[in-house]
Amino acid sequence: MIRKRLEELEERTLQKGACLASASRGRLKPQEESPSRTCFMRDRDRIIHSKAFRRLKHKTQVFLSPEGDHYRTRLTHTLEVSQISRTVARGLRLNEDLTEAIALGHDLGHTAFGHAGEQALREVVPGGFAHNEQSLRVVDRLEKGGEGLNLTMEVRDGILCHTGKKKADTMEGRIVHYADRIAYLNHDIDDAIRGDILSPQDIPASLRSVLGQTHSQRIDTLVNGLLTYGEEEGEIGLPPLLEEAMLEMRDFMFRHVYQNPRAKGEERKGQWVLTQLYRHFSENADDLPTDYMQIALQEGAERAACDYVAGMTDRFAVDVFFRLYIPQSWNK
């Protein structure tokens, strides 16, 4: 059987700390194994073929509905995280399939309008809102008409723990935590320069001297840092100098890009759109699509409204808002 051969190959070639497919803790619902794919390969494929994954191409990363073709979206961000994660996993002889599945699924629950949309729902949804928790709900509950994707425990854990204080149980999941930051900091710099929000010289010289002068140099520095630290320490992390520099770069980006009125001036409109949509559907559950009406009956209208609105793309959210609140022309 092909799957058995693949599992045996992992056992022979991966390092001691790797998460082996043959040692997976299984799924929420027991399921017969694939004859040709390991459990983590199967999870990766399920995520790629999901509706939530396809919707990422029309969800904002940083710049709302940019006119240029080369600005990142939530989908291209996800692909960059996956590429970095796989490079590190392969270099450290960890499970590349598990790492890739976590990376591809980590942002499935992200809202429209980037982190501004997440903040809008956090303020109005009872109990708050976090995109990593919503990503887990997407794969557990919302995909496949309410059946969920039934992913392995290791992929679910990595998706939930890709951000926040709790570390993933696996080294593969901890790779994605770092790869996510490496990807978004560097591609957000690239997009900010493209949008004339930053110039390369605006980045402090001290950070450029440590991390590199260009986009590719910075990614190379941080990826090599992960690899070096992993080989020397047997854990996922960065050498202290690089860890500090990355945190300083993150602070710099918050001050100059993520909170810059020129770059983020339209965000309040997006936040208001999502807020109004959430309130409408939580008060008018009959207006929800059939799948979400079922959630409303089982878990309440507020939960269903949150799931529906959080899953919207930027343009779909605007279209629904337009349909609900803007007078339509008479066409009879």
Image (tube, rainbow, N blue to C red):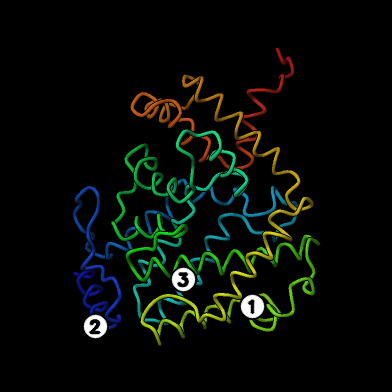
Quarter of the image where the N terminus is located: bottom left
The image quarter in which residue 300 lies? top left
- Distance from label 3 to label 2 (Cα)? 21 Å
Q: For mark 1, give the secondary structure.
A: helix
Q: Label 3: few (<14), some or many (≥20) within 10 Å?
A: many
Residue under label 1: 216
In-front residue for pair 256/67: 256
Instruction: Please give the name of the residue rendered at 51% of the width and 41% of the height, measured from the top-left corner.
Output: 311
Residue 12 disc label: 2
Q: Is 253 rendered above or below residue 216?
A: above
Please give left or right for residue 194 compared with residue 176 in the image: right
Q: In the image, what residue type sits under mark 3?
A: Ser
Residue under label 3: 85
Instruction: Please give the name of the residue rendered at 65% of the width and 69% of the height, measured from the top-left corner.
Output: 249
Q: For mark 2, give the secondary structure.
A: helix
- Image location of residue 106, percent across then percent down: 45, 56
